[in-house]
Image (cartoon, grey):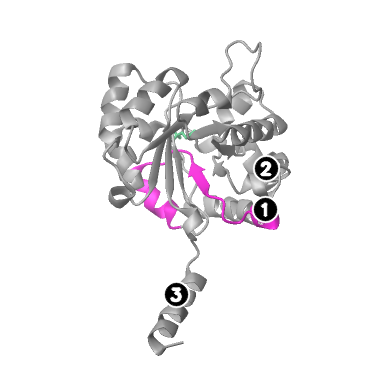
């Protein structure tokens, strides 16, 4: 091999070995609008996000909007690099399930993402770990990317159970196998940090992210993106993102303010 190409190859290998983030673990920032918005406000917010690209924000951007506004998001973001998704899906494929929305319906008109197992659904709709894993599987079967949310309560953290709770929540998801798990995204959202203004410190978040990474690695899915969520804002994003196992954020309140959301991604 000529000297120069050998040098280039060795340099590339050295960079590869020292880089913790592989191309599969692109920075990803997803806004979860929860039950907020109306046509007029959404139009302004989506128009402000529309020009964002990975060049301007250094992260892939997405929004998960309430069901009635999915079509509005699809239209407003068409041709942009901002993708969009839903906040939940039915575990069922189709049938007499009044009020439910299936993964294939969402896929039908171009949806990319589906949050599953958000703590608000686990706590207010009694969603079990197994149901969440089944929803992740339903999303994958329809070609959506599930964002599987996990997180401990304050009482569980205070009892020293944060990591064991996360492992329990993830177990049925990991049981879907490496092929499935490699296609999804995990979001760690400590319940005590959601909407409270009380963010986990970067070190607290990293500790749990590292445990999630280890569990993923153990089944051959170590490059899955793991997002942090819970009172993420522009002021704390950089320190969270500096942690080796934090690949991005799932943002609630701050995702409703275009400048703040874009600043998090930047
Ligand atoms: P906040 O960013 O408002 O704390 O919400 C986090 C969240 O639940 C995102 O899914």
**Where does the image place residue 85, in percent across and percent down from the top left?**
46, 31
**Where does the image place residue 8, in percent across and percent down from the top left?**
41, 79
Is tag 3's residue or tag 1's residue first in the polypeptide sequence? 3
> The magenta stretch spans which residues?
215-242
**Where does the image place residue 205, in percent across and percent down from the top left?**
53, 50
| Residue drawn where x is 49% and y is 52% of the image | 246
| Residue drawn where x is 53% and y is 56% of the image | 245
231 inside magenta stretch: yes
Q: Which residue is mark 1?
A: 215
Within 10 Å of disc 2 (Cα), the crowding (few <14, some 14-19, many 20+) is many
Within 10 Å of disc 3 (Cα), the crowding (few <14, some 14-19, many 20+) is few
Quarter of the rendering containing residue 130: top right
Residue 67 against residue 182 in the figure, above or below: above
Residue 12 numbered mark, or none: 3
Which of these two is toward me, 114 or 31? 114
Left or right: residue 160 compared with residue 83:
right
Quarter of the rendering containing residue 138: top right
Mark 3 → mark 2, Cα distance in angstroms: 35 Å
At mark 1, the secondary structure is: helix
| Residue drawn where x is 64% and y is 13% of the image | 97
Left or right: residue 233 compared with residue 67:
left
Looking at the image, is mark 3 or mark 1 nearer the viewer?
A: 3
Question: Is disc 1's CB within 8 Å of ligand 1?
Answer: no
Residue 170 numbered mark, or none: 2
Question: Is disc 2's CB within 8 Å of ligand 1?
Answer: no
At mark 2, the secondary structure is: helix
Within 10 Å of disc 1 (Cα), the crowding (few <14, some 14-19, many 20+) is some
Residue 197 against residue 53 in the figure, above or below: above
- The reply to whether dot 2 and dot 1 touch (C-beta < 8 Å) is yes
Quarter of the rendering containing residue 220: bottom right
Which of these two is toward me, 128 or 161? 128
């Amino acid at each position: 091999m000529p000297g120069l190409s050998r040098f280039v190859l060795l340099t590339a290998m050295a960079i590869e070995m020292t880089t913790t983030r592989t191309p599969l673990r692109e920075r990803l920032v997803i806004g979860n609008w929860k039950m907020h918005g109306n046509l007029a406000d959404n139009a302004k917010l989506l128009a402000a996000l529309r020009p964002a690209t990975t060049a301007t924000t250094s992260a892939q951007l997405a929004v998960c909007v309430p069901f009635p506004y999915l079509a509005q998001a699809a239209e407003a973001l068409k041709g942009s690099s901002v993708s969009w998704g839903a906040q939940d899906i039915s575990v069922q494929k189709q049938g007499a399930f009044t009020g439910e929305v299936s993964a294939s319906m969402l896929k039908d008109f171009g949806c990319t993402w589906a949050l599953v197992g958000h703590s608000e659904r686990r706590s207010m709709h009694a969603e079990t770990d197994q149901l969440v894993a089944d929803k992740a599987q339903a999303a994958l079967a329809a070609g959506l990317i599930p964002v599987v949310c996990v997180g401990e309560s304050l009482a569980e953290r205070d009892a020293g159970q944060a990591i064991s709770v996360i492992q329990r929540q993830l177990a049925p998801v990991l049981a879907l196998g490496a092929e499935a798990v490699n296609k999804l995204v995990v979001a760690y959202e400590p319940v005590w940090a959601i909407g409270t203004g009380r963010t986990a410190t970067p070190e607290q978040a990293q500790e749990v992210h590292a445990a999630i990474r280890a569990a993923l690695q153990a089944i051959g899915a170590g490059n899955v993106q793991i997002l942090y969520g819970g009172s993420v804002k522009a002021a704390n994003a950089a320190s969270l993102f500096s942690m080796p196992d934090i690949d991005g954020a799932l943002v609630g309140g701050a995702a409703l303010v275009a400048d703040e959301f874009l600043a998090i991604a930047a």
